[in-house]
Structures are given as structure tokens and as C-alpha cells.
Amino acid sequence: MYITDIDQRDWDEYAEPLTFALNTSYDITRDETPFYLVHGWDARSTLEATLAVGDTSHRDQKTRTRDSAPRSHTVPKRTVLQNEWCKQWFERSRCISQTSTNVIGTNRVKPGYARKLANMWHGPFRVAERVNDVAVRLETAGTPYQLLPIVHVSKLKAVREFPPLPMVQLTIPADERFDFD
């Protein structure tokens, strides 16, 4: 495209036609326009919108057929499911309490070591206090780790704490017990 101004200050004259040209160009792989993929209907120029040029029934029927396809119903359902998943993930990441034990993930690897074999989790640490919604202060006193005690919540992972195994006392005397091995 040729621009008449040497300093290219006349882009505002070309921005709208260029945008319209990009939005109405057909994509070869999907056989649709980018405007239709985003908005669900074909873009028309201001002249086409104000004046019905030619027979528009074919174009309107094609749009109605595409809009009634089952594909138009799957997009909102998928969006709702993605929103619910994001809410659940956000709530899970916020549920770090001061009573839980956590390990911290770091991106640092010692020089000369392979990243895929490195232990990226360090700890365990206890959460001393919650600074804000996305940051916590760790209890690092008495540990050999030298790190900044304020950490982002996404870098923490809860440590599984299993209950102690039950202790069962045998009430049968040893001479009456039958052991087989």
C-alpha cells in the first residue's frame, strides 16, 4: 500500500478500510471470515447496511442456517464451563491456611545441573501470615534455606500429611497365637 505522506501521518485515513478488508477476507482453512468467527454474523459495509443491494435473501438465509447450527450452542456452554473451572482453581489457590505445611517451588537450578532432574520444590514451610490475597509470609526461622519469606501463592504446594497408623495391641497370648510364614 502506498502512503502519500512521508512522515506517515495519514494512517487514520487508511485504518478503517484496512480493518474492514482484513475482517471480510475469507480464511482458507475454515472458509469463514474472521469477523464471522468472532461475532457470528458477516460484516457489511455502511452502504450495504443502508441500501439493500441486489438479492439479499440468499445471504440472509445462509447466515440464518449457520446461526441455527448446533455449533452456536456449544460456545456459550464451553465458556460457562471454563469460567466455573477458573473460579474453582482460583478458590483452591486461595485456600492456603496458616495451619497447613507447604513446599515452595523455585525456578532456580544450580549451574551445571539438568533442569528436568533438579528438585524444584523446597521446604516444608509453614505459613506465618497472609500478606494479601496473592502473597504469604513463610516461617523460615530455624531452616537452612536463605530465601525471601514473602512468596506468591502460586509458588506453594500443600504437603500431604497422613494420619499416624493405628497401633493394635494383641490380646491373645503368644503361645495360643498361630503364625504362618
Image (cartoon, rainbow, N blue to C red):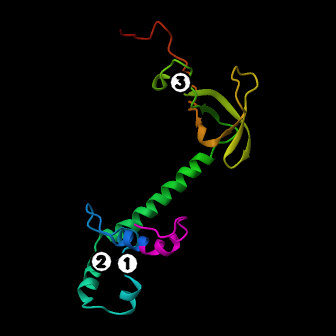
Residue 13 inside the magenta-drawn segment: yes
- Label 1 sits on residue: 43
Could you say which quadrant of the image residue 50 lies in? bottom left
Q: Is residue 50 above or below residue 69?
A: below
At x 29%, y 68%, the residue is 26
Up/down of 11 relative to 58, above or below: above
The amino acid at mark 1 is Ala
In the rendered image, residue 66, in percent from the top left (x then y), is placed at 28, 75
Q: Which residues are magenta?
A: 1-17
Q: Quadrant of residue 79?
A: bottom left
Q: Which residue is mark 3?
A: 119
Q: Is residue 27 left or right of residue 98?
A: left
Residue at point 62%, 46% (across, down): 95
Q: Nearer the viewer, residue 34 or 88?
A: 34
Q: Dot 3 lies on which element?
A: loop
Neighbourhood count class around disc 3 (C-alpha, 10 Å): few under 14, some 14–19, many 20 upward: few
Label 1 element class: loop
Label 2 residue SS? loop
Q: Residue furthest top?
A: 175
Q: Looking at the image, which residue is at 76% across and 25% down?
A: 141
